[in-house]
Structure formats: structure tokens, C-alpha cells
Image (tube, rainbow, N blue to C red):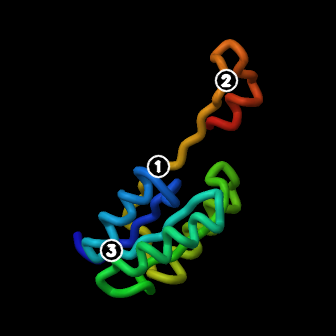
């Protein structure tokens, strides 16, 4: 497949950003996502400068992927900008920086 539309969650840094970069460099349309809007905007700008077709090949949707409205916005932006969704890389993750025995049921709900 070429010229795919790819959604990459958790792509404002780290592995997610590198995965998004790889898709951009191969010529795909990419929708990036992250909770920190400022950090995500910087990542999207950087990816847009690498895109073979220019910055129009990258869209960004800030927000927590655990929020249903963010998920809906990701799909909506992909469809409006690029007309389709071909690939989802569900990279977003959360972790607790506390001892296992201190993890509460509410903490576990945020991991889902």
C-alpha cells in the first residue's frame, strides 16, 4: 500500500513520534495525537517539514485517547483531511509511578 492514512496515538514524542516519522517519510498521510497540545504542535510541525508532500500531509488532534471525544475527533480529522483511515497505531500509554500495592481501582481505570 502507498499513500495510506495513518493515525498514531501518543505521537508527540518517543516511539510514537518515530513511528509517525517513518510513515511520513514513506509518503503517507499521518494524524498525530498527544495530550500536551504544545508538544504535539511542535511534533506535527517537525513531521510536516519531513513530509514528501509537505506539511499538508500531517494533521494533529490533541487530547487524551481515553476520552471518547478525542477518539471521535481523530477519525473525523482523518476523514475530512484525507478521506480515509487505513492504519491505526495505538501507541498511547499511561503508567503509575507508585508501588504496585499502592495502585487503586481508580488508577487501574485510567490504564484502560
Q: Are dots 2 and 3 in contact, CB under 8 Å?
A: no
**Residue 22: quarter of image:** bottom left
Of label 1 and label 2, which has the lower sequence position? 1
Q: Secondary structure at mark 3?
A: loop
Q: x and y percent of residue 28 in the render?
A: 32, 74
Label ID, residue 91: 1
Please count the marks in the image: 3
Label 1 or label 2, whichever lies nearer to me, is 2
Q: x and y percent of residue 95 in the render?
A: 60, 34
Name the residue that disc number 3 marks: 28
Residue at screen point 58% across, 59% down: 34
Name the residue that disc number 2 marks: 98
User: In this picture, is 69 found above or below 52?
Assistant: above
Residue at screen point 44% across, 52% down: 14
Residue toward you, 60 or 6: 60
User: In this picture, is 100 found above or below 9?
Assistant: above
Q: Secondary structure at mark 1?
A: loop
Q: x and y percent of residue 49 in the render?
A: 39, 81
Label 2 or label 3, whichever lies nearer to me, is 2
Of label 1 and label 3, which has the lower sequence position? 3
Give the Cα separation between the discs numbered 1 and 2: 22 Å
Residue at screen point 43% across, 59% down: 17
Amino acid at each position: 500500500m502507498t499513500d495510506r492514512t495513518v493515525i498514531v496515538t501518543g505521537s508527540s514524542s518517543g516511539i510514537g513520534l518515530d513511528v509517525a516519522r517513518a510513515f511520513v517519510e514513506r509518503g503517507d498521510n499521518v494524524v498525530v495525537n498527544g495530550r500536551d497540545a504544545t508538544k504535539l504542535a511542535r511534533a506535527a510541525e517537525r513531521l510536516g517539514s519531513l513530509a514528501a508532500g509537505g506539511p499538508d500531509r500531517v494533521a494533529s488532534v490533541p487530547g487524551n485517547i481515553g476520552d471518547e471525544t478525542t477518539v471521535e475527533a481523530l477519525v473525523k480529522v482523518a476523514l475530512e483531511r484525507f478521506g480515509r483511515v487505513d492504519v491505526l497505531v495505538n501507541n498511547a500509554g499511561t503508567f503509575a509511578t507508585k508501588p504496585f500495592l499502592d495502585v487503586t481501582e481508580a488508577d487501574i481505570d485510567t490504564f484502560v
